[in-house]
Image (tube, grey):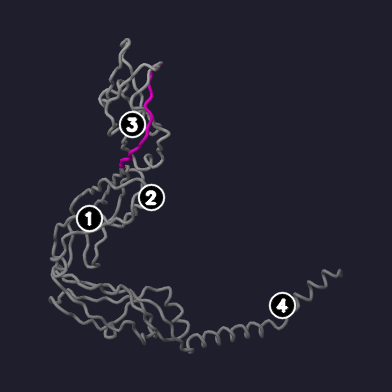
Amino acid sequence: MTPTERIQAKVRDLLTREMPFKVLSLVFAIMIWAWVQTQQIVSQRTRAQVLWSFPEEMTWIDPVPKTLVVTIRGPQGLVRNVKNRTLRYDVDLSESEQGLVSVDFAGRSIRGIPEGVSVVQISPPGVDVQLDRKMDRVVKVVPAVVGDAGTGYRVASITVEPKAANIAGPRSVLRTVAEIGTDVIDLNGLTEDRTYTLALAPKERSIVSTLNEPVKVTVDVEPVIAEKTFTDVPIMSRADGWKAVPATAVVTLSGPAAAMRDLTADRISVQAHLPNPAPVGKPLSVRFNPAEPGAGLDVVHQGPKDVTVIKVVPNDVVLQRSP
């Protein structure tokens, strides 16, 4: 017999020797375990749902609990199985009148608990429910916004669609409500128009919206417009052999605040255009006319196209032949 065969024979002998006694020992062990499971009493905390039934024309003012914390006690095996069950208290207030109703959970049966397990503690043990008649009302929708638009921009307008919504709730609460807000919109850093799709957010939990569509809030932003005045801006003739009198001007520009902040006097000039043909041997007066760019006096700058000229002082200059 090989070493492997000898090892196999010893293992087989250990497993089969005195088999009736081994089986009997296993049965006794199982019986003892089952006895412990049924005789050892333990406690455990779990949650139980609360199913409420209210009169059709009534509703609660303050929120009612949807779950309770319950402490159960019973045989260990049964208590362990409770976590796989749904425990529930049914609270039927459908015949209650308007006003305060006291609900004692300790005096109510709990559904889903196995026989042999009892509830020894409930938290909260009871609640007072204030019932009021239902009311519907159409109120204004007001977007809830926080923050400011990006640097150099401002909020031009905020529009909301729909502008009104129907809400429902207890009469004593709803009669003082004139508007309903939305989820919060954060405007920080916003530099372009944007549309948000939001849900309504009543301030009171007893108020619900019957609006079946989301609210769309459109925020339009625009650049902040600023004016800036530049002195000693050179007036330059567009034709050789001519000079401007005076030689400098004061120029006021308007445009987006960010662009105006970056624009400096050395990036601006006033260009004097001569008519064609130019007069011979006599001075010529040219005037700034914003309706005719490129003629007379014209302001040239290195800012963006939306920077406009507000004023040039003097408004006209004299062009003379250079000596």
Query: Disc 3 vs disc 2: Cβ atoms closer than 8 Å?
Result: no
Earlier residue among tags 2 and 4: 4
Q: Nearer the viewer, mark 3 or mark 1?
A: 3
Mark 2: give few (<14), some (14-19) or many (20+) Cα within 10 Å. few
Q: Which residue is mark 2?
A: 189
Disc 4 to disc 1, C-alpha distance: 80 Å
Q: Nearer the viewer, mark 2 or mark 4?
A: 2
Q: Circle 1 — which element?
A: strand
| Residue carrying label 1 | 142
Q: Amino acid at mark 2?
A: Gly
- Residue 15 is tagged as 4
The magenta-colored residue range is 225-240
Residue bearing mark 3: 249
* Mark 3 vs 1: CB contact within 8 A: no
Q: Which one is in front in this view, the residue at disc 3 or the one at disc 4? A: 3
The kind of residue on which mark 3 rests is Ala
